[in-house]
Amino acid sequence: MSSALNDLTGMWIPDLHYVYGDNLKALGLDDNRTLDYETRLMITNNYLAPRVFEVTKIIDVSNSGVIKYSIKQDEVDETRDNIELGICDYYTKTGELQVKPPEENTNPETYIGSIKEMMLVDDELTENPDGTGKLKIGVASYFKGEFSSEFVDPEWHIELVGDNYTDEERKYYSRLIKINEFDHSIISVKPGKASSLKGKQFKLVVSDINGNYYATYDLEVEA
């Protein structure tokens, strides 16, 4: 923010809809274009003496993806403002609740992920409809993650399957399987040249950093 001699302050914020488009809700973000003329904001870290501002002007064309506001300082209204939550005009002028409590989400966002086995055909990767998850020692196999949102940053890892292994053995065998990422969603999986891998079963796992879009694919190193 920057101040001017006429007691107006300039405030710049990113236009989230310009950056993320209609995927805002999937990312858990709000459309901040709803800030309007005469909107009152509580901008403070000090709730003992909060500072309130009122929007006096909106300029959304100064730079692409940036919204500029002119704001002036206002007074806290203890009847209308909820200081504890940091929300202005939470109540009506008579002190009645104005902000409706959030409705129960009857259609929660679904985080769908899947893994498909791929194959090289004329130097191009295409889906392998007959994929069995069989891996060959020293040979790369290819897999693709598909997600219900295009803004997923996938994380891949390998897990050894079976109950008769120690933690050290699980780490050892998982490290023998090399994963290389080619682009946003395609990887290669290549078993190292260790005969002890033969017959071992693994689980290929993908998800985002929060554990959403979780998907698995069963793998086995051919004997």
Image (cartoon, rainbow, N blue to C red):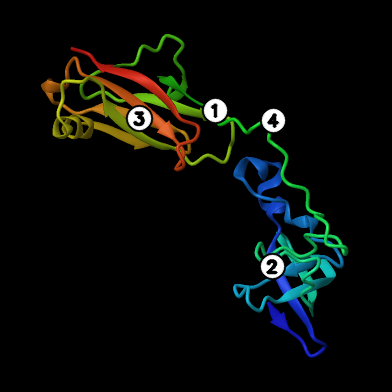
Dot in front, 1 or 4:
4
Distance from label 3 to label 1 (Cα)?
22 Å
Where is mark 3, residue-wise? 188
Label located before the other in sequence (2 or 3): 2
- The answer to whether 64 appears left or right of 55 in the picture is left
Amino acid type shown at disc 3: Ser
Q: Residue furthest left?
A: 195
Q: Residue furthest top?
A: 130
Circles 2 and 3: CB distance less than 8 Å? no
Residue 11: mark in rendering: none
**How many residues crowd around disc 4 within 10 Å: few (fewer than 14), some, or many (20 or more)?**
few
Say if residue 189 shows up in the picture.
Answer: yes
Where is mark 4, residue-wise? 106
Q: Residue at x 67, y 42 (%)?
A: 25
Where is mark 1, residue-wise? 112
Distance from label 1 to label 4 (Cα)?
18 Å
Amino acid type shown at disc 1: Ile
Say if residue 121 shows up in the picture.
Answer: no
Where is mark 2, residue-wise? 83
Along the viewing direction, whichever of 113 and 166 lies nearer the viewer: 166
Q: Is residue 53 above or below residue 110?
A: below
**How many residues crowd around disc 3 within 10 Å: few (fewer than 14), some, or many (20 or more)?**
some
Residue 105 in the image, given as x and y percentages of width and height: 68, 35
Residue 33 in the image, given as x and y percentages of width and height: 77, 56
Q: Is residue 21 above or below residue 219?
A: below
What SS does tag 4 mark?
loop
